[in-house]
Amino acid sequence: METKPYNPGDVASIFEYSKGILGHTLRDFVPVGYEARKGKGGLGEMVEEIFFGYDKNSNPEADFSIAGLELKCTPLKNSKKQELLIKERLVCGMIDYIEEAGKDFEHSHFYEKCRLMLLLFYLHLAQTDKLDLEFIYSVLWQLPEKDLLIIKQDYEIIHNKIVNGLAHTLSEGDTMYLGACRKGQKGEDTTKQYNSDIPAPTRAFCLKMAYMRTILDFVQKSGTNAICNYKLPKGEEAVSVDALKSKTFDSIIIDRFRPYLGKDEQTLARELKINLSADSKSKFYQLANAIAHEGKHSNINKSEEFQKAGLMMKTVRVQANGKIREAMSFENINYQEVYDNDEWLESRLYEIYSSRFLFVIFREQTPDVRDYVLDKVFFWTMPQEDLATAEDYWNNIRTCVVQNKIAPKYFWKAADNRNFHVRPKGRDSRDLVENPNGGKCRKYCYWFNNDYISKIVNSHA
């Protein structure tokens, strides 16, 4: 038997050996006459064969099964400012709806394979041979106890849809960290599902983009290119491990709001012991944040769990007549990202709109008096049919950017009544950013229409 330069049954030995690939490409290790594997998943198999010395043909469980360690190669991309960014979700195995229906979390493919992973980050370069891609970071990532508790809740949400014949309704927005992402040609492939004759889109378990960003951020802040997370620094947490052992994340957050429902802003401020900002827009977020975070931290959206999930809390004010005066803004359009990416499912907008939202609703009691009370709170995920409209919205934006037509007359408008629109969000007409076509252009932002927000609010009792 061939002796390997590391102990395949020892996690520490494997991790130590992995450092030898950093700063290199597989071309530096490839034997003469080696035939490169094709396909998107070929890189990981080639790393196992070329660098770690596994024969995939004779050992289908080459992912260090003796050590209980899964190898994952995941791409980074360079921004125009030469910053390394996460390129995509981490795919953790295809979902076989029939097989998965008979499993529980502890016997799932994800749990058995991905509790402990060796993540090799490499720099993606378009039109480059896989053998010539450089490896940047090696991360030994053991899913923390709290993350596993949340991921188990995510799995159960996905599993419940599968066993109830609702796999065709799955969405990445259903869950926090563990997603069920679309796979196949442009996400359009379908397959047979359990307990239903309706074909379901082909999906895979994945760790979401937001979760992968927190791993990259952890590595970059460490100042080293090889690190393990056994001693992960503790961030601002929204919920505790103990709380998650008995309740779901959603129920913990929603329960915090229940004692305050029906109370006006002055009463809320007094009971929460906070001084409201004079800014009429931010004070409602102040109140909601103090409740959601139990007054412990400055911004719930920056808590560990919200960051890892890409979850956003949004406050909405409903007038006494039931109308919503203001549209809802999101981040500014990154023109370079839109220009460079021609895949909707890989776009930043898809990530935002397929994420989860925590809506906190304040309702005016008397017309024009602005006597708002805390009315209701709910988690929301964009329905698939609205995501289809969002894809058209994104296609319009991308066409405009690629054709250098970055101006309001080319973008969707609120008056078009198509759920979403584009409009400026810069300080003034002199607040400009780089145009990927050359020169500068005004800042524009993604928006929800007023009537779309009304539809969301009214759909929750």
Image (cartoon, rainbow, N blue to C red):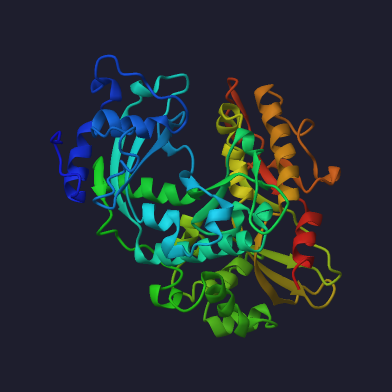
**Residue 131 can be seen in this image:** yes
Q: Residue at x 50, y 77 (%)?
A: 247
Q: Quadrant of residue 337?
A: top right
Residue 85 placement (x, y as % from top left): 43, 38
Residue 386 placement (x, y as % from top left): 74, 49
**Residue 303 can be seen in this image:** no
Q: Nearer the viewer, residue 138 or 257?
A: 138
Q: Nearer the viewer, residue 308 or 405?
A: 308
**172 lies above or below 202:** below
Q: Quadrant of residue 421?
A: top right
Q: Residue at x 69, y 21 (%)?
A: 403
**384 lies above or below 263:** above
**167 lies above or below 93:** below
Residue 105 placement (x, y as % from top left): 46, 63
Q: Nearer the viewer, residue 26 or 122?
A: 26
The N terminus sits in image quarter: top left
Residue 66 placement (x, y as % from top left): 24, 50
Q: How many marks?
A: 0
Give the residue at the far top of this rendering. Answer: 33
The C terminus sits in image quarter: bottom right
Q: Nearer the viewer, residue 167 or 319?
A: 167
Task: Classify residue 386 as left or right of residue 436.
Answer: right
**384 lies above or below 336:** below
Q: Residue at x 69, y 69 (%)?
A: 361
